[in-house]
Amino acid sequence: MPERKPEPDHWFRNSLHEMIFEADTPAGKLFDVALILSIIASVIVVMLDSIISLNIQYGQLFLALEWFFTILFTVEYVLRLSCIGRPTRYARSFYGIVDLLSILPSYLSLLLPAGKYLLVIRILRLLRVFRVLKLVQYVGESNYLQRALWASRRKIAVFLLSVFLLMIIFGSVMYIVEGAENGFTSIPRSIYWAVVTMTTVGYGDISPQTGLGQAIASLIMILGYGIIAIPTGIVTAELTYKQNITTQACPECSAEGHDLNAKHCKFCGADLHL
């Protein structure tokens, strides 16, 4: 029996997916390079537009360029959703959310003019450069760290809650010890001081004047150094294994991070070699 040719719609979707999501083909690499250059240009336009003297002189040009890039990225976002089997899964992914946030500020600026400066979030889209340059090891390290952070999320949440409680306790103690005459005018303001001190930032806008207050401040500073190291230890404990991966994206859910010899997507089970 003669081999059955793929339907035109299916063939078009696969070709579009290969160009947009894959960086291993000439068309895919050319698309990603053009996309990265467009992202850089759009971010530069937003930053230049924030300079008052340039805005006065070239404001209309910046506005036109801003909308040009917004429409371009909007079309690209729609194409990304249309060429995968499960568009909602991509829309909820990290890159999907970043792609959406990179175009929303322009439409938001119709109601809130200053909102257009949020377009600098487009810079996050440059993370795709790792795929374009075939730096697979960096993609692997990124997924490796992401898994470790996700696995330790509960421990970090408990740790942050404990730190938050300590901030309240130390702030309240300093409010009692120092009082309003030394700048600790309320418990919230004292908690602010405790946050600044424990994180070792030390703005110096408020400082204890009494001996007891300075002793407590010294304790908080020393404790702060130890607290900073704890999240690192939590995440490091979760870094237990590594594996080689490919940059190939699933044609159904657009997920990446598959093993080099994988035949099916480990997230949705779709065939990776359509």
Image: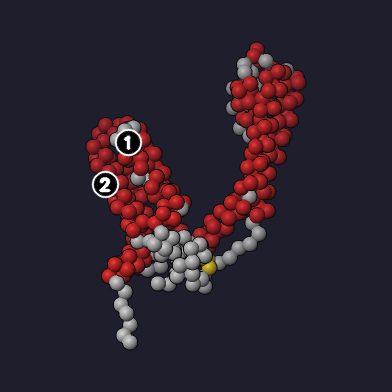
Quadrant assignment, res 222: top right
Q: Which residue is mark 2?
A: 68
Between 93 and 49, the residue placed more toward the observer is: 93
What type is the residue that disc 2 sits on?
Answer: Phe
Tell me if I can see residue 105 in this picture.
yes
What type is the residue that disc 1 sits on?
Answer: Ser
Residue at point 32%, 65% (across, down): 13
Percent x, y of residue 11: 31, 70
Percent x, y of residue 250: 44, 64
Left or right: where does residue 236 sit relative to residue 105? right
Residue at point 39%, 50% (across, down): 99
Percent x, y of residue 255: 46, 60
Discs 1/2, front:
1
Q: Which residue is mark 1?
A: 109
Secondary structure of the residue carrying tag 2 is helix
Quarter in which the C terminus is drawn = bottom left
